[in-house]
């Protein structure tokens, strides 16, 4: 789960950077998708940390 979380965070950061370069509605959609990937990655890391404690 940690690997998936880290990969989602990396893809989210790259997606935000690419969304800033794009123009118009496509850039906004790219940033929204990247933010959802970033939040999912943070969620995966938090879940992995809680499962490790048990």
Image (tube, rainbow, N blue to C red):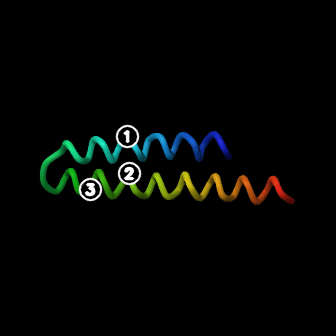
Instruction: Tell me, for residue 14, which label it has, or none.
Output: 1
Mark 3, other Cα within 10 Å: few <14 / some 14–19 / many ≥20: few
Mark earlier in primary sequence (1, 3): 1
Residue 4 % position (x, y): 60, 43
Mark 2, other Cα within 10 Å: few <14 / some 14–19 / many ≥20: many
Residue 23 % position (x, y): 13, 48
Check contact, mark 2 vs mark 1: CB within 8 A: yes
Residue that mark 2 sits on: 34
Instruction: Tell me, for residue 3, which label it has, or none.
Output: none
CA gap, disc 3 and disc 2: 9 Å
Q: Which residue is drawn at 46% across and 52% down?
A: 37
Task: Identify the image quadrant of residue 15.
Answer: top left
- Give the left or right position of residue 52, taking residue 40 as reference: right
CA gap, disc 2 and disc 1: 8 Å
User: Regarding mark 2 in the picture, which secondary structure is present there?
Assistant: helix
User: Regarding mark 3 in the picture, which secondary structure is present there?
Assistant: helix
Q: In this view, does 7 lie above or below 35?
A: above
Residue 29 % position (x, y): 26, 56
Residue 52 % position (x, y): 81, 53
Residue that mark 3 sits on: 29
Check contact, mark 3 vs mark 2: CB within 8 A: no
């Amino acid at each position: 789960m940690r690997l998936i979380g880290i990969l989602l965070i990396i893809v989210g950061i790259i997606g935000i950077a690419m969304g800033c370069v794009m123009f118009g509605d496509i850039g906004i959609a790219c940033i929204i998708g990247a933010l959802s990937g970033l939040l999912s990655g943070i969620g995966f890391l938090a879940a992995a940390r809680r499962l490790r404690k048990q």
